Amino acid sequence: MSVATLPARVASGAAWTYASFAAGRVLVFGGLAILARLLSPEEYSLFAMAAVGIYLLEGSRDFGLTRGLIYFGGEHPSGSLLRTGFVLAVCLGGAISASLFGLAPTIAAFYGDPRVTDLMHVLSVYFVIACVGLVPDALLQRQLAFDRRFWPSLAAPAGRYAIAIALAARGYGAWSLVWGQLVGISLEVTCLCILARWKPGLGWSTAAARRLISFSSQVSVVEWVAAIALNLDYALVGHFLGGELLGLYALAFKLPDTTLGAAGFVGSRVLLPTFVSLDRQRLPTALVHTLRLLMMLLAPAGAGLFVLAPVVVPLVFGTQWSDAVPVVQLLALSSCLNGLLQAVGAGFVAAGQPRRIIAAQIVWVSFLVPALYITARISIVAVALAHVLSMLVFGGVKLAFARSTLGVGGLQLGRAAVPSLLATGTMVLVLVPTLRLAELLPPLAVAMIGIVVGGVTYAIAIWTLDRASMRQLLSLVRPEHFQSSPAVAADRSRRLAVTMIVQSYFPRVGGAETNLQALIGPLRARGVEVTVLTRRFPGMAPEDCVSGAPVFRLPVPGNQVRASLTFTATAVWLLMRRRWTVDVLHAHELRSPTMTAIVAKLVLRRPVVAHVLRGGLLGDVSVLEAQPLGRLRVWLFKQLVNTFLAISVETRRELLDAGIPEARITSLAYGVDVERFRPVPPPQHEWRRKELGLEGWRVVLVVARLEPEKGLDTLLAAWPRVTAAVPRALLVIAGDGSQREVLSRQAASLTDVRFVGLIRDPVPYLQAADCYTLPSLTEGLPISLLEAMAAAVPCVATAIGGTSEALGGLGELVPPGDEEQLAAAIVKVLRFDAADREAIGAATRRRVIDCYSLEANADSLYRLYDQLAHRRKPQQ
């Protein structure tokens, strides 16, 4: 996965978020520069003491409710969920405001300045106002409507600093900042409600409240701990070092926050809804690429601010703030680390593992709090250094969890960071002597020279070291990402709109589902907008967004006939409502999906592609012909389907035998992401086995639905022969299905068989396996086999369908249902020495790269869609 393959809405969201952040920070930066000249450090420190509650609680005022609404909301959240979230948010906001109001005298006594009490009493209203905007903010974020979120982001700082500057010029001192803060948040909330088209309303759903509280309570711990820990320094500096140094420290903190805080801002605004829209399997790759791009931005920005701080701080704020320079330099490093860790945290939350962040934060806070308490007695520079060291500790723990939770190891992250670090080092080596040569020039000229020289040097270096990533980064600022809305941007840039009709889809996992989900990103990168129509099973939402494509799950009540009729009628009605956004109908499987596509074609006059997924006795053609009116349906498909896709020689032959003209049959194999499914070196292979509890075993893996056609009963019957020849052999069966109990009973007497259930990410198991087997009775082209081949695992499979073509002479092929030959083939593979295993694995991986590439698969589909859509247009 890369930025180029992210959905158009994600690219639009990232572009608009960076735009809103940049514009907002320009306003903040300009406002601070003016206020620094209108207010004394003492007046600024007085406001900083009064605003300590806002600093501590700003990032966590909603107790995680916003993220809960994003996580559970889907594309069209229910009214009960929104109203319940609003009630919870307002109640929490009122409770926080009341608490701050009551604590004002205590906090004033802590700082030793009674003037703080009145300021805090007025500022406590902030949270009541802010919580009104939580629900509309969550709506805009979940829809990735960051073009509309742009304006509230501007309204807040514009109103805040306009009022603050006007009042400060009239001599209102710290009160100018207080009233500016309240006006700014009021403007932001008003804009959010208007642009989200949402009117606050009261309502209650106990079920919705339980879901929100259960999820949000975990996230809120993360946010509260982070907010309090990151702002505890304000309280300690003001208490131990005095108000004047607090003002100096607070302003120094603002400079890296307003320049380097973009990563944290994007992490909280874009990455969570983006990662949630991805499937769990693609999340690790997306996280690595996100961190690579963030590193390309943060490393040079942080290093540049560190080097230029002695020039920039006096130039922007005045010479009276020069003592803040070393604080700015250290906090620049801390801000860079924080931005990177925001992305990792978003990955944990999207994976449903916020507890990992809590555990990391416990370690972080255990280090940070005593460090701040000690350094706050020394100097503000020591406090800034404590932040840097604590971020290093936090990052180490978080990245360790990333390996176990997301499968993202330190080696991957190191490779992603190397180009940026080398380019940044080159920039610093050029920038430092350049500034020394220019030090006699006016400060503004020195700053401009430093920015230009540093920027040009870094751009040349990173273009030389990592040109592909640089192009991906530049793609975020293309003009098409700034269209008036994500929908308009997609409509203007796309060439084709394809509706996929499939029996089942994510979170259900099978070969067709996996291939379709993997294809969405590459197809969208080629200008194809994908919509998925599928059946709704218990526990699934009627509408969703998976891998960036809208998914509509339609009802299937009653028996098979009634379910099929209901699905077809509902699908056609939905397509009629969306007819101008449908260019091609693509049905996966010959039965109900193709029948639905045919009916839709008669109404909409759109071309139909029918994907034949399986061959043999249980294949699409054979099963369809054996059903009532099956031959009539075959004849109907023959007349009305524009193109049949055959995924193997066997399915192609069956289509020809059924009378389908050869000219309307296209061979198209499945594709695999060879970057994700790849082998690992022997040390990591052993580490994977230890991580999964497979250490000391010769592991035979099968990843399949537990259904009769997969032949797992034959495998279990053959297994005693395998263990008799290879005593330390262990069979690992990954998957779920209707035969789970039957197969478990069959394996009850076998101590060396392990059922691990449905797994979302098979990569760790493939990287730990010695042999992969697939004893199916019928197959089209098994994705799981291609994934094992791409991971360089020696394979044993039955000689059916596309399996024979894919594996060829590079693996062991046996007749379906033959226990003896299956056992002998597995034993043969398990007895391979290291050299044989490596040679066979390399050959199978090379075949997948050459013949079963996901990119080639997407290219072929795009050409087919384009041909069918353009063939239709002259007739309209």
Image (tube, rainbow, N blue to C red):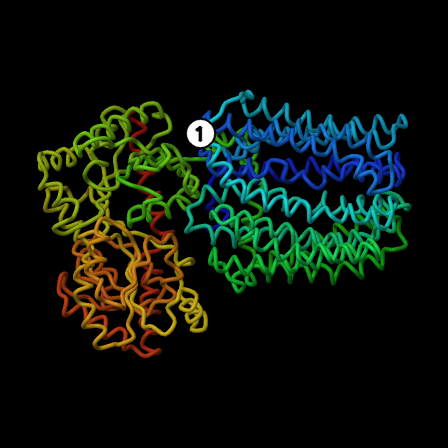
Q: Quadrant of the C terminus?
A: top left
Q: Quadrant of residue 610?
A: top left
Q: Quadrant of residue 53?
A: top right
Q: Residue at x 21, y 76 (%)?
A: 724
Residue that badge 1 annotates: 76
Element type where label 1 sits in the image:
loop
Residue 725: image location, x then y, percent: 22, 77
* Above/below status of 541 relative to 516: above
Side (left or right) of 642 relative to 630: right
Side (left or right) of 427 relative to 142: right
Q: Residue at x 76, y 37 (%)?
A: 51
* Above/below status of 685 relative to 219: below
Side (left or right) of 209 relative to 89: left
Q: Residue at x 86, y 44 (%)?
A: 243
* Above/below status of 121 relative to 667: above
Residue 132: image location, x then y, percent: 61, 26
Residue 450: image location, x then y, percent: 78, 52
Of residues 365 and 651, which is closer to you in this image?
A: 365
How many marks on residues?
Answer: 1
Of residues 330 and 500, which is closer to you in this image?
A: 330
**Residue type marked 1:** His
Side (left or right) of 340 relative to 536: right
Residue 463: image location, x then y, percent: 60, 56
- Packing grade of label 1 (10 A; few <14, some 14-19, many >=20) is few
